Amino acid sequence: MGFPGAISVTPGGQYGEGSGPIWLDDMNCRGSESLLSECCFKGWGVTDCTHTEDAGVICETGTNITSNRQFSVDNSLGLSDDLGLLFDSGDGCDFSINVRDLSEEAELVFCVHRLILLIYPELNITNESRNLTVDVSQMCHPHVSSFLRYLYTQQIDVSMTSAQCFHQLAFIFGVNKLMEDVGRIFTSLIPEDNTFRTQVLMYEYGVRTGDLVLQENVLQYLSWNCEFLISSPVWSTISFHMIDALLQRSDLVVKDEALLLEALERWIQDKGDRISSEQQASLLNHIRFLLIPVDKLYEMQFSSSVLHQNHEKLYLTGLLRGFQFNVISFSKIRNKMDNMSNEYLPRIYTADGFSVFINDMTTIYQYYDYNYGQNNRIQTFYTPAHPSALYKDQMVQWQAQAFLTVQECSYYGLSCDSFPVTRLLAYGNQNSYTNTIRFSNRLILSCKNQNNVFHVQDFKNDMAVIPTNSNMGLPNPCPDDYSLRFVVRPEYI
């Protein structure tokens, strides 16, 4: 309910008696559970209680920031509220829905109206149908009534704890619009687990239910946090189809491609015989050898890794193409390699030579701070024009800037409409590469204490406005304590 904790419990219906079915009885809790449903109990609705025994609780004052927030989903488009009252009353109902769990130990029966169900063709209801039996996990039985009411009204309140149940029910009944809406609510949960276990489970759940929106939201977050994911214990547990999907993406934030190859080799070694030779080769084909730094390419030819041993020809071909990419002009390579697809397109590489941090996003600077060079939100650095060895000595000067106020913007002759706002500006000879190289630079937002990346944004005309929670895909879990990372991202045209 949003309170930080409990002071005491009051038995015997002291705060009034409830109504309706009693779902939980003979509870056996250890005290470490975050949900009542995590305690041991006989089963949903299995009870010998009356409402005179209802429990109450005295809560601590204050607000819990991880409270079970409610999200209202409304797709009614003017539908009458009387339809909800019709469901509540059951008047004239002519169709039975039997809800059971896989063990068949608990079963609920709801009387509904066939005409409502005919709206949902996935259920294969006909005019002759009289009942429908569905298997729903016992944990979700208390939410079935609210879901069935949604079929009438197209309105429902979804909480963090009920979201997965409503998503499961929407999948079973084929209510795709509700699945999409609840999938967006799942997005609010994504940044909250730094172990990545929740995100991996959510992705696999999205695969099972065919929810492409949920899959994409999770994959995007894990791509942004790839460097942390591959060093976590969860890395060795992820499935083949998940790592296959990740390695095909260009929004992976990682130090360099060599680190990604090392992580893949670790994953394959941990999986052992559970990954076939064909699957190994498929994953190896997703490694962008052309973008591995040339000094690391040289070391890799002497490695004794599993991939090198099992797929020597494929591995050495990747190394050869990597060397070619570093010593031959791109115009020649491009004419000979029509099927390169994504292998020459960079991911978001954060190696020291191509990125810089700005950590101070709170101090308001005055004009004299600029004059004396005391602004920590202005960073100057140099990068090669491209990671290829051909350009290692051709340097481009960059200045990363972050502004919090109109005054800070105006000092640099800028007119800024939104704050905070950033700029990544190149100086010098970068224009000499305009026919060959473009800079698709990125701004990475991450929490200082947790290190997790919660947003990645590109620059438009050298500028990037830092979004607020209202227009950001993922919520900002650390609005007052985040850092910026400016990443220079050269790519061949």
Image: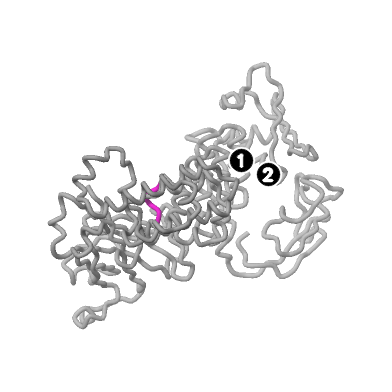
* 77 is higher (above) or lower (below) than 35: above
> Which three-letter amino acid code belongs to the residue tagged 1?
Gln
Residue 489: mark: none
Which is more toward the observer, 331 or 83? 331
Rounded to the nearest angstrom, the CA distance separating label 1 from label 2 is 9 Å
Q: Is residue 101 left or right of residue 493?
A: right
Instruction: Tell me the kind of residue under disc 2.
Output: Cys
176 versus 308 height, above or below: above
Q: What's the magenta bit mostly, secondary-structure-wise?
A: loop
Residue drawn at point x = 45 percent, y = 60 percent:
227
Q: Which residues are magenta?
A: 249-253
Label located before the other in sequence (1 or 2): 2
Seen at 36% across and 46% down, the residue is 317
Disc 1 on helix, strand or loop?
helix
Q: Return the x and y of residue 267 as percentages of the image width and height.
A: 53, 53
What colour scheme has been applied to the protein in the rendered image? one colour
Q: Examine the rendering and report whether any part of residue 194 can be seen.
A: yes
Q: Which residue is mark 1?
A: 168
Circle 1/circle 2 CB separation < 8 Å:
yes
Residue 30 drawn at (x, y percent): 76, 63
User: In the rendered image, which quarter is residue 472 located in?
Assistant: bottom left
Q: Is residue 280 above or below residue 128?
A: below
Quadrant of res 478: bottom left
Query: Quick check: 447 left or right of 174?
Result: left
Which residue is under mark 2? Answer: 140
Residue 471 covered by magenta stretch: no
Residue 420 in view (yes/no): no
Q: Position of residue 296 (x, y in %)?
A: 36, 61
